Image (tube, rainbow, N blue to C red):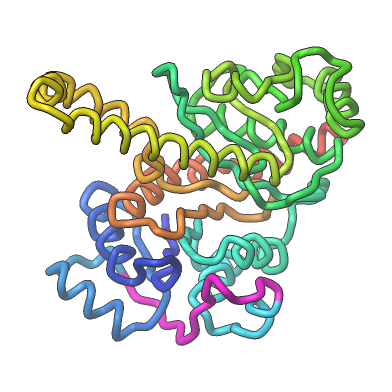
Amino acid sequence: MRIVLDGMGGDNAPAEIVKGAVSAAEVIDDEILIVGDPTAIALELQKCNYTGSRIQIVPAHEVITMHDSPVKAIRGKKDSSLVVGLNMVKNGEGDMFVSAGNTGALVVGSRLLLGKIKGIERPALASIYPDMTGGDPVLLVDAGASSESKARNLLEYGLMGSIYAEKVWGREIPAVGLVNLGEEESKGSSVTKEAYKLLSESNLNFIGNVEGRDVPKGVCDVIVCDGFTGNVILKLTEGVSLSIFKLIKETLKSNVKAMVGGALVKSKLASLKDEFDYEEYGGAPILGVSGPVIKMHGSSTERAVRSAIIRGIPYAKENVVDIIRQEIKENK
């Protein structure tokens, strides 16, 4: 398999991107094609003392920044690492595209260059969300691809998320929940009420509404919501978790007794911190486009890049895009 990696996307490109590629190449047999400034990427490979043959450089001389307008950037910067990489997947020169670049540009580019799966109105960003009770993580769909969604879109998110959870994570009959104001069917906006009805009538294992306080409890495998709500959930969780760990750290350093207690629970706290660490999970797939695309966090480091590559491989190898296409066709 050929993994196409955006070498210039994100806050830490190309150094951390290249390091992540080299780290991943040590444990996988697949080819990694890093797209971007060939001189800069070659220099980083040299710094890593990489002498293998499974990492190749694909030249691209423009960069889409975080401040660029998504549509203008896709149409105007055709020699950017993001556009070149997506076109490689489109033309069959790569099997999966991974990027830490501009989220809006990646979503728009995936829609314009790869195209949407027939029957999918709005692709969705599926982010991995930790189960704070210690269980397996869940999939949050949509995490920010579309700020507004219709009831039909929420049904599509549930279907695509369920397929991903089953085929990539190996979850049998994944449970799907809808984020809402309350558990009752009558709660919520007109959109969520209609979505509840559509999800209930589908073949999905729909468990009903999920309140905000239950989202972190891992009550289902797939959490469905519009992109505005999903993005707020993710960023609020990230902010709260960072604040809590900072408070714990400061408290454990407050006096000798606290420091002794901190030493005793250090390994447990480290394990707990991993549950909230996006770098542990790598990236989020963009579901609903005609090709496997993985979006990494903008500040991804070597560890996150490595995780995104390794954890993303089943998305392409299990032909999840084709399965979604067939399921949508059968449910129309």
106 and 243: which is toward the camera: 243
- In the depicted structure, whether residue 305 falls above or below residue 44: above
The quadrant in which residue 162 appears is top right
Left or right of 69 on screen, residue 216: left
**In the image, what residue occupies the spot 64% across and 34% down?**
161
| Depicted 326 relative to depicted 111: above or below | above
Answer above or below: position of 176 versus 24.
above
Q: Which residue is pictured at 86% across the width and 41% down the height?
A: 150
Q: Percent x, y for residue 214?
A: 60, 19
Query: Is residue 132 depicted above or below 151 in this figure?
Result: above
Q: Is residue 73 found inside the magenta-colored segment of the image?
A: no
Q: Residue at x 79, y 33 (%)?
A: 155
Q: Position of residue 135 (x, y in %)?
A: 43, 18
Residue at 18 percent across and 20 percent down: it is: 265
The number of numbered badges drawn on the structure is 0
Image quarter hosting the C terminus: top right
* Quadrant of the frame with the N terminus: bottom left
Q: Is residue 117 left or right of residue 26?
A: right
Q: Which residues are magenta?
A: 56-71
